[in-house]
Image (cartoon, helix red, strand yellow):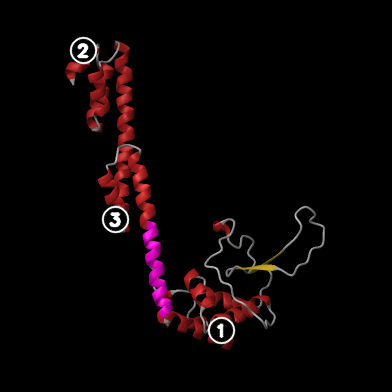
Amino acid sequence: MKKLEDMNLVDDFLAYSLAVHKTYGVEAARYILECILQRKIRNLTVIPQKSWYGETAGTHGGRGRMIYTIGNRCLEMPELPYEDGARTVFLYTKGTEGDPPEELQQLARYMEHSTAENVKSSKLAKLHQMVTEVKSDREVGLAYMKSYEIERMLKAESKADDLLMLLQETQEISEEERKRILRETNLRTLDNWYQEALIQNRQCIVSKSKAASILILLEDFGPVPEEAKQRVLAETDLSVLDSWLRLAKRAESLEQFLQSI
């Protein structure tokens, strides 16, 4: 968990907290937007959203520009002029194409690493002071701890669900065991259980495959008695199954195999 004081403006929680801050939100947003749009903004209403993921999260800023401005158009008639004034602007802090203004480059560097070392102008110094104040705000700190707890709980619930689904692939789960798994909130414990279940699941798949191979070989001698079939299918020790598989390949009759095991 990253400490609040170590966060940068590209971190979702800090950016959101700054934008909604009752004292600094509008002022900080105005400076950032004026820097991006390269014009003065008079009236401003801030409606923040916690995150906005791109269409392909792995290729943010795909063509290397710092600014991408998107306008509306008519899909059916792209050539039809349509100007409603609405614009969506994406800022890619690592962009270099398009010759971005020096002030914007400084802001981008500061947003990536929001430290005093990256304050290169009086306007950035003012933004840095606001960011510092927001980081030390008690209400912001409490909100961060609450959001962390909620995220941790959601991750635990998701991991528990994944574990139950994995276990159900190879065994029946008692109600008591299901409740025990769902009650667990320690992510490390749940992850350990999941890894153990994953190993058991793989072993179960391999053992079933080996048991099936043994029965196929035995069926060459005729119908396999149900008791013998169930004994082979119930065996989970891979070393035992390997031994039985070798015996089945060498056996001259079903009786010989059954006597050998």
Element marked by disc 2: helix
Which residue position is annotated with label 1? Answer: 124
Residue 131, placed above or below residue 179: below
Three-letter code, disc 1: Leu
Which residue position is annotated with label 3? Answer: 184
Residue 123, placed above or below residue 175: below
Residue at the (50%, 86%) spot, across then down: 129
Dot 3 crowding, Cα within 10 Å, few <14, some 14–19, many 20+: some
Find out whether residue 141 is within the magenta segment: yes
- Cα distance between the residues tagged 1 and 3: 46 Å
Three-letter code, disc 3: Glu
Which residue position is annotated with label 2? Answer: 255
Name the main secondary structure of what is drawn in magenta.
Answer: helix
Query: On residue 168, which mark appears?
Result: none
Count of numbered labels shown in the rendering? 3
Three-letter code, disc 2: Glu
Give, as a single range, the part of the protein colored magenta.
139-155
